[in-house]
Amino acid sequence: MFDARSPLTTGRADCVACGRSHILSARTEACDCDRRENLALHYSLDAETGSALRGSLAGNAPSLWRYAPLLPVESRFASRLQVGWTPLIDCGPCGSAHLFLKDETRLPSGSLKDRASEMVVAVAVAHGIDQVIVASTGNAAASLACIGAAAGVQVTVLVPATVPPAKLAQIVAYGARVHRVAGRYDDAFVMAGKIAEAQGIINRSTGLNPFTREGKKTCALEIAEQLGWQAPDWVIVPTGDGNILSAVWQGFRELAALGWLERMPRLVAVQSVASRYITSVFNGEEPRSAGNGETIADSITVGHARDATAALAALNESAGVAVTVDDDEIIAAVLALGARFGMFAEPSSAAAFAAFERLNEAGRFARGDRVVCLITGTGLKDLRPVLAASALDAEPAVDPADWRSIVPVAAQPVEPAACA
Ligand SMILES: *Cc1c(COP(=O)(O)O)cnc(C)c1O
Ligand SMILES: [Zn+2]
């Protein structure tokens, strides 16, 4: 049974692929049908619940727990880190659109994954389970290690040998037990499942744990609240497994069920050309997935998209769009986000801005459309692409006696033209 649950949770979860309903427990994992994808939690939400709830939210804590009635577990199981309520930065008119950046780089471990880890760890604590395991190529493990450390939960991480150094350093610094697996991510994924099963502990691996989506949906709840309980016209989501994409859609759907939204946003999935399973299926093209190393966007590189069914449903239901961007566009987007908006994003996150620019140029946005790019992770996670692009090494160092050679360069005006 699922203890300490919030009253609106029905205690049941459905398979997004075959539709079968499951009774929820702290250790509920994917359905045993052949798709083996995440289950979707069930809430009883209607306009009556909505009007009772609405007024009570305004004074709540500035964290994702302000939405506790819409979350699976009570807020007393929150970690002390204050996860969520990140700023929605208004960047003003940009081409025909009005651009907003949802700044998830400010979450405790520097990525949106913290929303999911916070929820998984709270479920563990509520059920007296003090061990959580994850197979991850980087951010999910760094995030779980971070939140687990702050909540007294021991975290075990299985990583393939290719994990970027900054992410590995985070995992180590947060005190998780790290095991490097002699194999690929998929081998680590299977191992994590076996260990969790044998030891009765929780597995946070993406696509198995239904609570990751519950945490991530709060990003959509925040965007709507920050826009005065309105949906934007578009939300651009960097996509690998599709868990964020499906979570964002679930968040907006729940708000609609509560009667708080008049319109729904359209979702944009952005993937790397090197790893584009969801985009290819959505656009009716030949699917392709990649191994790590084929693109600088490691966080959206997946061998097997583990939340594809729900992600594709989100794209279909929202009249969405799916695009791919290449590494050159991604690196240009990293530099543009940094120089124009003071936002340092990791390559996977900058892909959202690359997609924004592409769709803007193609005239896909109506004049004044409000477009939110999810900036899902900080640029400090991977410094190599930026340093390589700077080519600073190739320039000779300046002789201090030549100080007169350094003259001011005209500042870039911050105005609509700078975005076009
Ligand atoms: C995990 C991650 C994504 C992609 O999320 P999926 O649920 O796999 O689609 C995007 N950006 C960052 C920074 C991530 O860590
Ligand atoms: Zn099923």
Image (cartoon, helix red, strand yellow):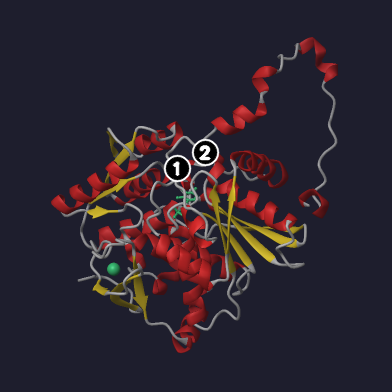
Of helix, strand and loop, which one carries label 2? loop
Instruction: Kindly identify the amino acid type of the residue bearing the numbered disc 2.
Output: Thr
The amino acid type, in three-letter code, at marker 1 is Ala
Residue displayed at 57% across by 33% down: 385
Nearer-N-terminus badge (2/1): 1
Q: Which residue is mark 1?
A: 290
User: Residue beneath label 2, please?
Assistant: 295
Q: Which mark is residue 229?
A: none
Judge whether residue 346 can be spotted in this image.
no
Q: Is residue 284 visible?
A: yes
Q: Residue at the spot x=38%, y=70% of the render?
A: 71
- Few, some or many C-alpha atoms within 10 Å of disc 1 (few <14, some 14-19, many ≥20)? some
Say left or right for 410 vs 309.
right
338 or 264: nearer the viewer: 264
Q: Measure the C-alpha gap from mark 2 to mark 1.
A: 8 Å
Q: Is residue 122 above or below residue 74?
A: above
Mark 2 beta carbon near ligand 1 (under 8 Å): no
Vertical placement of residue 183 versus 56, above or below: above
Where in the figure is residue 152, as x and y percent of width and height? 28, 49
Q: Position of residue 306 (x, y in %)?
A: 37, 56
Mark in front: 2 vs 1:
1
Contact between marks 2 and 1 (CB within 8 A): the answer is: yes
